Image: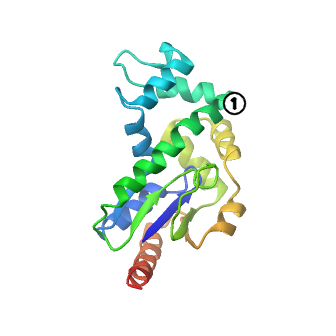
């Protein structure tokens, strides 16, 4: 059984997946797959270099992520081009890996599950939700951003309301780790039950 896990930036997706991993649940992360997809020697990296030029590569021959982020943040057409290239590759890599899962269900962590035009055929959608204020605080602290930069990223994502409306399951992550663990425990038991049917 495939559970698509998503949530806005700073919602606590990593903390939640760490809790599920303690139950020996396999986790497949789109961000990890994206890093593999653009590793040196990969066809996607070659296409990115051809499109953006060699200045998009750092001295080690790997993708200069910050440069690329800066380009696509202010150029929606470049962002679309990159997403059209990478999203199908990432999805295919995730499902190829997930076919070999050994746990009763697995989590496919897709931060842009709703923003991507690529559909993920998952059995359920689990959303990690948090208040806007906490989202901004966490993002600023983790990524060293200004409040406005964090707000700009949040503004480019689908709304909390949209995410919640399209979720099968929701974990509320408002800062209490014990409460978060309890929510994961309940969902884990529920997913185990579902995976047996």
Residue drawn at (40%, 79%), measured in percent from left and top? 195
Q: Quadrant of the N terminus?
A: bottom left
Q: Position of residue 121 (x, y in %)?
A: 53, 63
**Image position of 64 with respect to 175: above or below:** above
Label 1: state its secondary structure.
helix
Residue drawn at (37%, 54%), measured in percent from left and top? 96
Q: Quadrant of the C terminus?
A: bottom left
- 166 or 154, which is in the foreground? 166
- Numbered circles on residues, count: 1
Q: Position of residue 98 (x, y in %)?
A: 36, 59
Q: Residues within 10 Å of mark 1 (few under 14, many from 20)?
A: few
Q: Residue 196: which quarter of the image?
A: bottom left
Query: What residue is disc 1 on?
Result: 77
Residue 144 horizontal side relative to residue 73, left or right: left
Residue drawn at (44%, 23%), measured in percent from left and top? 46
**Image position of 118 with respect to 98: above or below:** above
Q: Position of residue 110 (x, y in %)?
A: 51, 53
Q: How is the image coloured?
A: rainbow
Q: Residue 38: which quarter of the image?
A: top left
Q: Residue 171: which quarter of the image?
A: bottom right
Q: Position of residue 6 (x, y in %)?
A: 54, 58
């Amino acid at each position: 059984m495939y559970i698509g896990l998503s949530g806005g930036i700073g919602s606590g997706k990593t903390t939640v997946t760490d809790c599920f991993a303690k139950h020996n649940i396999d986790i497949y992360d789109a961000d990890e797959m994206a890093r593999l997809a653009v590793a040196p020697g990969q066809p996607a990296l070659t296409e990115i270099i051809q499109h953006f030029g060699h200045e998009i590569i750092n001295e080690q021959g790997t993708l200069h992520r910050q440069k690329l982020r800066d380009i696509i943040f202010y150029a929606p057409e470049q962002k679309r081009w990159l997403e059209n290239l990478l999203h199908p590759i990432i999805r295919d890599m995730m499902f190829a890996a997930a076919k070999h899962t050994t746990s009763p269900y697995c989590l496919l962590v897709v931060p842009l599950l709703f923003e991507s035009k690529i559909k993920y055929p998952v059995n359920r959608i689990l959303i990690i939700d948090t208040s806007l204020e906490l989202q901004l605080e966490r993002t600023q602290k983790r990524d060293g951003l200004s409040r406005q930069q964090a707000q700009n990223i949040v503004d480019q994502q689908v709304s909390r309301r949209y995410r919640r409306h399209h979720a099968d399951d929701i974990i509320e992550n408002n800062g209490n780790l014990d409460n978060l663990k309890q929510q994961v425990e309940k969902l884990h038991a529920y997913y185990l039950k579902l995976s047996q049917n």
